[in-house]
């Protein structure tokens, strides 16, 4: 049953990448920006969840809500202060700003909470499930992560298609100027996109640290990069693509650790991405966009 154990581990890890990747793909799809500070937003929110449970003894559900609120506010503030003034700037200027915001958040966490790793308590309400006489064990963290991924995917798809704000996001994504002429508040719509993506980052951070219980100022850096890779892998700008790319990336990483090499697993993940982009530059579910010149 080791293969099934690895498969479940891969899907659960990939589900976390998928939830994080949704933040990248929403911001890029609607605002045409790459928010490379997204991983550090995860880290800040997770610290809030940690202190909510350890210092204030709040229930796990309240700690998750605290992480989501923190990430939501932080995402909106970052959009307003760092990205909105660069709305008409070049992609390079936005990229440099995003890297600067990332370094600022990491160093803020170092100064405020120190560099020593903290043991994050599991906030998962489920116990592990043992099947086939103990040959297959599914942890409570894996169950919670996969259920959260399904819930987020269904809820976000419904929101984008049926909700008025979701329709406004789709309009801004298609043509920002035309959407503004039709009375859509573009600044508000983009700010809400950052808010939703950052709230999802708060959920992903708590799930990640519940599965791998070590919290430090660099906690969100590598998962953030891998989630961005997942978004590109699936087709950045595509919500189903982010979900598919995240799950596939998690499975590739876990199977690489199990059957090839623990040290080379990260290199294999990025190598697969390079191959996919050489064969299909738009990603697995991305669409080619023709521009008139």
Image (cartoon, rainbow, N blue to C red):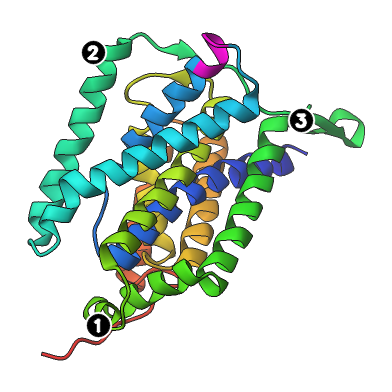
- Counting residues from the start of the chain, the first of labels 3 and 2 encountered is 2
Instruction: Label the magenta part by its dominant secondary structure.
Output: helix
Labelled disc at residue 59: none
Q: Nearer the viewer, mark 1 or mark 2?
A: 1
39 left or right of 262 in image = left
Residue at the spot of label 2: 111
204 left or right of 60 in image = left
How far across and down, in percent of the image, does residue 202 sit?
A: 47, 37
- From mark 1 to mark 2, how far is it between C-alphas? 46 Å
Q: Which residue is found at the position 45% from the left and 67% from the top?
A: 165
Q: Residues within 10 Å of mark 1 (few under 14, many from 20)?
A: few
Q: Which residue is found at the position 54% from the left and 10% from the top?
A: 54
Q: Is residue 266 visible?
A: no
Q: Residue furthest bottom?
A: 292
Front residue of 249 and 263 = 249
Residue at the spot of label 3: 126
Front residue of 84 and 215 = 84
Give above or below for 61 relative to 29.
above
Give above or below for 4 relative to 130.
below
180 left or right of 229 in image = left
Give the position of the N terminus as an image quadrant. Answer: top right
Q: Residue furthest front?
A: 183
How far across and down, in percent of the image, does residue 72 sit?
A: 40, 42
Do residues under tags 3 and 1 come within 8 Å of each other at their CB atoms?
no
Which range is magenta? 52-56
Residue at the spot of label 1: 181
């Amino acid at each position: 049953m080791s293969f099934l154990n690895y498969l479940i581990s891969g899907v659960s890890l990939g589900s976390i990448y998928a939830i994080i990747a949704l933040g990248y793909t929403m911001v890029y799809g609607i605002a045409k920006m790459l928010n490379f500070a997204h991983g550090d937003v995860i880290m800040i929110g997770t610290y809030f969840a940690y202190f909510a449970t350890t210092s204030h003894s709040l229930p796990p559900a309240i700690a998750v809500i605290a992480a989501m609120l923190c990430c939501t506010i932080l995402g909106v503030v970052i959009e307003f202060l760092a990205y909105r003034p660069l709305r008409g700037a070049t992609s390079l200027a936005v990229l440099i700003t995003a890297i600067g915001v990332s370094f600022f958040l990491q160093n803020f966490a170092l100064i405020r909470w120190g560099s020593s790793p903290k043991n994050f308590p599991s906030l998962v309400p489920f116990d592990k499930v043992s099947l086939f006489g103990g040959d297959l064990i599914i942890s409570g963290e894996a169950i919670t992560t996969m259920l959260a991924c399904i819930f987020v995917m269904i809820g976000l798809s419904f929101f984008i298609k049926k909700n008025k704000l979701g329709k406004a996001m789709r309009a801004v994504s298609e043509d920002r100027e035309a959407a503004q002429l039709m009375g859509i508040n573009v600044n508000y719509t983009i700010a809400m996109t950052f808010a939703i993506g950052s709230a999802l980052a708060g959920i992903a951070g708590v799930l990640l640290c519940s599965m791998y219980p070590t919290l430090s100022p660099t906690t969100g850096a590598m998962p953030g990069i891998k989630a961005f890779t997942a978004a590109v892998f699936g087709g950045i700008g595509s919500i189903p693509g982010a979900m598919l790319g995240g799950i596939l990336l998690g499975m590739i990483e876990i199977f690489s650790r199990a059957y090839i090499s623990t040290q080379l697993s990260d290199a294999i993940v990025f190598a697969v991405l390079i191959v996919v982009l050489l064969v299909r530059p738009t990603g697995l579910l991305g669409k080619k966009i023709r521009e008139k010149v």
